[in-house]
Image (spheres, helix red, strand yellow):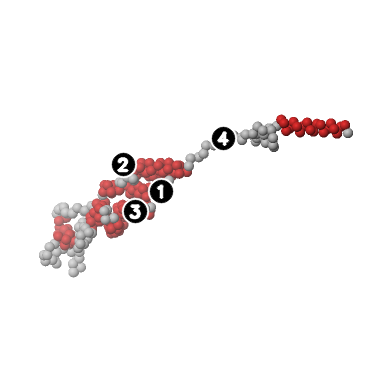
């Protein structure tokens, strides 16, 4: 019994001590005891983040453009191999576009690789919807096509070029030089090739309205009796040691490398 009373006194003392000695966060000694939570842990150390993707792309594009401009300068100096090396560096920096293929085609042309030049320019043609740039591509192709397929196909490409862009004077002038006609003058039809080596054609071109001499002999022609009509006076002149007059064959503008350079060399914007 005595031990039970001792326990009661001890319990009462503990109760009074807890109520009197503990205070709440508002400094009062009544109500529930609220224990403040421990302070929050410091934030984790920030790690270095990689640069945004768009900034990286801008840097790559700028580097590629520098290589393209370098290729242009090498083409100006007639160094197509150096230009190709710069173009390949540009390809590694970004996807190739119009100017990449435009310059690559020019490098091939300057190396005398006309088939590769034509095909590369065709890729450049598909890289743009700008009609002026497309007209420029076709004009460049006409230079290569002349060496590959001759005057007729080249003339057809030039006709498409100046019809697509009326301001493309080079395409029109090259066409006029090849055909001897101005496509914008009514009734002006293409003339015969003035550089023909046939004396018969040359005489017909220079003949007015005089009567035709049916007995006149021309080289490489045959008479009615089956005998050659081309070994008369011409052979006699050779035997006497006379020099045969050769009319200078006309060189068209489209065959002039300098003409190509003047038109082709345009620096990208």
Q: Which residue is mark 2?
A: 77
Q: Estimate the spatial distance between the alpha carbons at disc 1 and disc 2, rounded to whole Å.
A: 23 Å
**Looking at the image, is mark 4 or mark 1 nearer the viewer?**
4
For label 3, the SS is loop
Q: Residue at x 16, y 61 (%)?
A: 205
Residue 243 rendering spot, x and y as whole percentages: 16, 52
Residue 176 rendering spot, x and y as whole percentages: 23, 56
Q: Residue at x 35, y 47 (%)?
A: 103
Q: Estimate the spatial distance between the alpha carbons at disc 4 and disc 1, rounded to whole Å.
A: 42 Å
N-terminal label among 3 and 1: 1
- Quadrant location of the N terminus? top right
**Looking at the image, is mark 2 or mark 4 nearer the viewer?**
4
N-terminal label among 1 and 2: 2
Q: Nearer the viewer, residue 196 or 66?
A: 66
Density class for disc 2 (Cα within 10 Å; few <14, some 14-19, many ≥20) is few
N-terminal label among 2 and 3: 2
Relative to 162, 32 lies left or right: right
N-terminal label among 4 and 3: 4
| For the residues bearing labels 4 and 1, Cβ distance under 8 angstroms | no
Q: Which residue is mark 3?
A: 130
Density class for disc 4 (Cα within 10 Å; few <14, some 14-19, many ≥20) is few
Density class for disc 1 (Cα within 10 Å; few <14, some 14-19, many ≥20) is some
For label 4, the SS is loop
| Residue 47 visible in the shown view | yes
N-terminal label among 4 and 1: 4
**Looking at the image, is mark 4 or mark 3 nearer the viewer?**
4
Q: Residue at x 32, y 47 (%)?
A: 110
- Quadrant location of the C terminus? top left
Q: Which residue is mark 1?
A: 96
């Amino acid at each position: 019994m005595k031990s039970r009373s001792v326990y009661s006194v001890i319990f009462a003392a503990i109760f009074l001590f807890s109520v009197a000695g503990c205070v709440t966060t508002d400094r009062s000694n009544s109500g529930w005891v609220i224990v403040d939570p421990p302070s929050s842990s410091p934030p984790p150390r920030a790690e270095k983040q990689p640069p945004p993707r768009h900034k990286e792309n801008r840097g790559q594009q700028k580097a590629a453009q520098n290589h393209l401009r370098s290729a242009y300068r090498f083409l100006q100096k007639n160094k197509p191999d150096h230009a190709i090396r710069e173009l390949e560096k540009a390809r590694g920096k970004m996807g190739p576009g119009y100017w990449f293929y435009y310059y690559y085609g020019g490098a091939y042309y300057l190396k005398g690789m006309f088939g590769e030049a034509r095909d590369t320019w065709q890729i450049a043609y598909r890289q743009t919807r700008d009609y002026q740039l497309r007209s420029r591509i076709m004009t460049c192709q006409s230079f290569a096509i002349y060496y590959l397929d001759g005057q007729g196909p080249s003339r057809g490409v030039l006709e498409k070029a100046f019809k697509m862009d009326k301001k493309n004077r080079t395409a029109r002038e090259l066409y006029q030089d090849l055909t001897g006609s101005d496509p914008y003058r009514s009734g002006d039809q293409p003339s015969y090739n003035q550089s023909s080596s046939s004396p018969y054609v040359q005489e017909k071109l220079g003949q007015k309205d005089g009567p035709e001499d049916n007995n006149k002999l021309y080289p490489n022609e045959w008479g009615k009796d089956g005998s050659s009509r081309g070994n008369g006076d011409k052979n006699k002149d050779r035997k006497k040691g006379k020099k045969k007059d050769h009319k200078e064959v006309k060189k068209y503008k489209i065959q002039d490398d300098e003409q190509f350079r003047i038109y082709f060399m345009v620096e990208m914007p």
